Amino acid sequence: MSERAGQPESPPEASSPRPEDGTIDALTDGLETILRSLPAEAVALVRPATEGRAGGVLAAAPASLVAALQAGSPHPPWLVVALEQCVAAEGSLIALDRETGLYDATGPLMLARCTVDAASGPLVLAACLRVAPSSHALVRARLVVAKGMIESLDLRARMLGVEARSRRLAGVIDAAASMGDSRGFQGAAMEVCNDIATRYGCDRVSLGFLHGNRVRLAAMSHRESLDRRSLLVQAIEEMMEECADQDAEVASPTDAPTIVNRRAEAFRKSHDMTNLLSLPLRVRERTDATGAADTGVRAVLTLERSAGRPFTQADTIDLRMLLDVAAPALVRLHETDRWIGARLTHDLRRLLAWVVGPRNTIAKSVGVAAAVSLLAAALLRGDYRVEGTFTLDVPRRLSVPAPFDGFLREARVKPNDRVEAGTTVLAALDDSELKVEAAALIAEREAKLKEAAKARSERKISDAAVAEAEAEKARARLELVRMRIERATVTAPATGVVLVGDLDRMIGSPVKTGDVLFELAPTDQLHADVAIPEDQVGDVSVGQSGLLATAAYPSTRIPFTVERIDPLATIDGQRNVFNARVRLGEIPASIATSIRPGMQGVAKIDASRRSYLWIWTRRLSNWVRMQLWL
């Protein structure tokens, strides 16, 4: 009872209810009785100090002490000691002698204390008295009786509080039930306004719902229709907006320094209404990412009373309880009991408010990014490429045979060596015997020519003709030998790579005409066989171009053109593929000398230009069509 005893207190904890004014009055009357039963100068009921709450005086007697405390006078010395030593006590007596500074000419003072179990927590009954030691036992006995009286008063107050709460709960249930009997939003709103006006003796009760940032009056007690152009309706709506903006109960008059009630004050003065009270209707709409409930103001209820009937704290508690029960049903009816266009507009507005609101920022950012990405994928177009594996190959292999019977003199290349057509020497046969034979044939031809010349000079025509014929024969044989000497040096017939021909161990060995010495792969005739998956072969046609990259040189691309597609599928692992023959374009100079038949890699054929969404979902859509037979 800080307002009665003058001792300021901190707000009580949620678990320790504060005694109501009626209870404090009863306690004060009880202390007056205790004061008369004890030889005491004054008594007080003191609240002990706890960790979350300061101690203070709850009630006191006589009236002169109460008046002094309410006037802000300093506490008497004995009360200061009682507050400082406010610990659990059971009928204890403390002598306030010279050491305490309270001894006077009349004699020593005694501080009597005992603990009282109250609804708001343990209290201490303190009394200042002057008694002889022989009366101490009597004082203790009377303290026990006084303690029982205080506990009885507190128990009675507690029972009255339970009864009052039960009546309030019954009223809430009755009001909610009457609203549930109404059909439609307008009937329910009128029922709530009329019931509250009757139950709480109000001159007028109004209910308004939020539409954006404005409040629109929906119902008024004992009135079937509303003229929204009237100044009364507009003033009530402005007063409701003041309550909704603060999300708090707004009263007029009020002593709450944190509540703005300018509109309510102006309305009260201009409409001769002595007491006004506006309460927000809150509804739990959603839960944010942290799991906390989001309670938003959806409507405002305004009550008006004439002079002499102010709104008490109990009225506010009852109305708050009633509105908490009725608000969800009223809001649901307000949203559903209207034509479909208004409902769709309301739902769209709530969706947009959620989208642009500050909650769930990460989820919204991800959703917006996904939507933008999906839209971009549907609108932007890119190259649709058919991908397949390939193997480099040549149309034929060139065999280099021995030009004549002889002995291998040297071999200058090995397998995997690169050769140039007409310039790279592959091997050489022994031509020493051929050179000797050529010299002999030259000498023989010269001799026959001289013999023919001599026969002509002697007019031996027939001998001359025979000698000339033999000389021509020697010349023909010489040409053949010279040709073999030239062919003894074996050169590359085409540009390419040596596939077969490791002849180092055959040097000096005889070879016969037609024996294969080397096999060459002409790289200028390279092509690739691309394995196209069965589900994509329909997207490939002759003449399309693309790029391929070998596994050995993945960063270098080689252009190609599709020449033909085999009509018969082959098995590649566990799937059907169709081989497409492609003609290679110009091979980049960086790998031109390193490309070999048999290399493998990945080829991508430019099939068409499609949207990225179609490209990414093509296989899935085809699978769905096959499964659902679409």
Image (tube, rainbow, N blue to C red):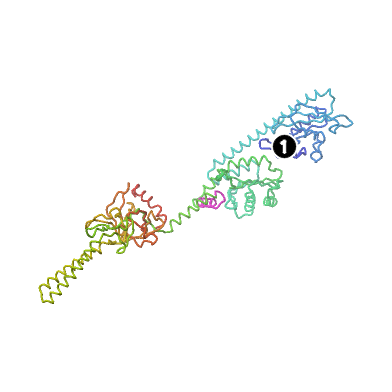
Task: Give residue 393's quadrant in the image.
Answer: bottom left
Crowd tier of the residue under label 1, counting other residues whose Cα lies within 10 Å: few below 14, some 14–19, many 20 or above: few
* Residue 118 visible, this angle: yes
Q: Position of residue 262 (x, y in %)?
A: 68, 52
Residue holding disc 1: 21
Q: Residue at x 66, y 37 (%)?
A: 14
Disc tally is: 1
Query: Who is closer to the viewer here, 112 or 192?
Result: 112
In what quadrant of the picture does the N terminus appear? top right
Q: Is residue 128 magenta?
A: no
Residue 381 position in % (x across, y down):
42, 59
Percent x, y for residue 258?
A: 69, 48
Q: Is residue 538 visible?
A: no
Residue 359 in the magenta stretch? The answer is yes
Where on the picture, by quarter, is residue 596?
bottom left
Q: Amino acid at mark 1?
A: Asp
Q: Which residues are magenta?
A: 342-360
Q: Left or right of 582: which side holds 405?
A: left
